[in-house]
Image: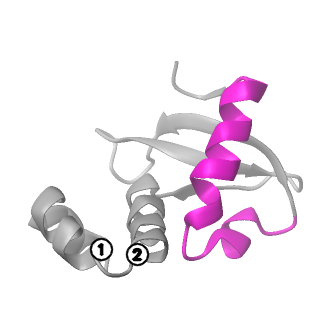
Amino acid sequence: MDGEELNKEDEEFIILKLLAYHPHAEDKIGCGLQAIMVDKHPQFTQSRCLFVLRTDGGWIDFSYQKCLLTYIRKKYPSYAERFIKEHFKRSILKSLK
């Protein structure tokens, strides 16, 4: 459901396996991470997004696609760009720059 925090198991997975690879993870977490939530983006109302809920009561969205791109580039540097070009839509890549 929109606006709900993830359960602890899913949250741990997202933090360790996804958010950890966001190019600005430290900025996204800020003062501290309280929870991960799924909700509609306030600006792009047709999109459901992941949000970091911070310990100070603030929240910020983060792109799982940026996390995936960073993961691929770090883990598979020799093949990353070719893989990304073949498997990610061009429109997504443009929006992530």
Which residue is located at x 48 percent, y 62 percent? 67
Which residue is located at x 57 percent, y 65 percent? 21
Count of numbered badges drawn on the protein: 2
Locate the C terminus and report the quarter of the image it occupies.
Answer: bottom left
Quarter where residue 81 is shown: bottom left
Badge 1 is on which residue? Answer: 80
Tell me which label, 2 or 1, sits earlier in the chain: 2
Q: Which mark is residue 73?
A: 2
Is 64 covered by the magenta stretch?
no
Read off the magenta span: 6-31
Q: Are marks 2 and 1 in contact (CB under 8 Å)?
A: yes
The answer to whether residue 50 shows anywhere in this view is yes
Which residue is located at x 38 percent, y 54 percent? 43
Q: Describe residue 5's horizontal placement relative to residue 50 as left or right.
A: right
Principal SS element in the magenta part? helix
Task: Tell me where residue 56 appears, x and y as whole percent.
Answer: 88, 56
Q: Nearer the viewer, residue 14 or 97?
A: 14
Task: Tell me where residue 76 appears, x and y as whole percent.
Answer: 39, 72
Please tell me whether mark 1 sits on a helix, a strand or a loop.
helix
The answer to whether residue 52 shows anywhere in this view is no
Q: Residue furthest top?
A: 1
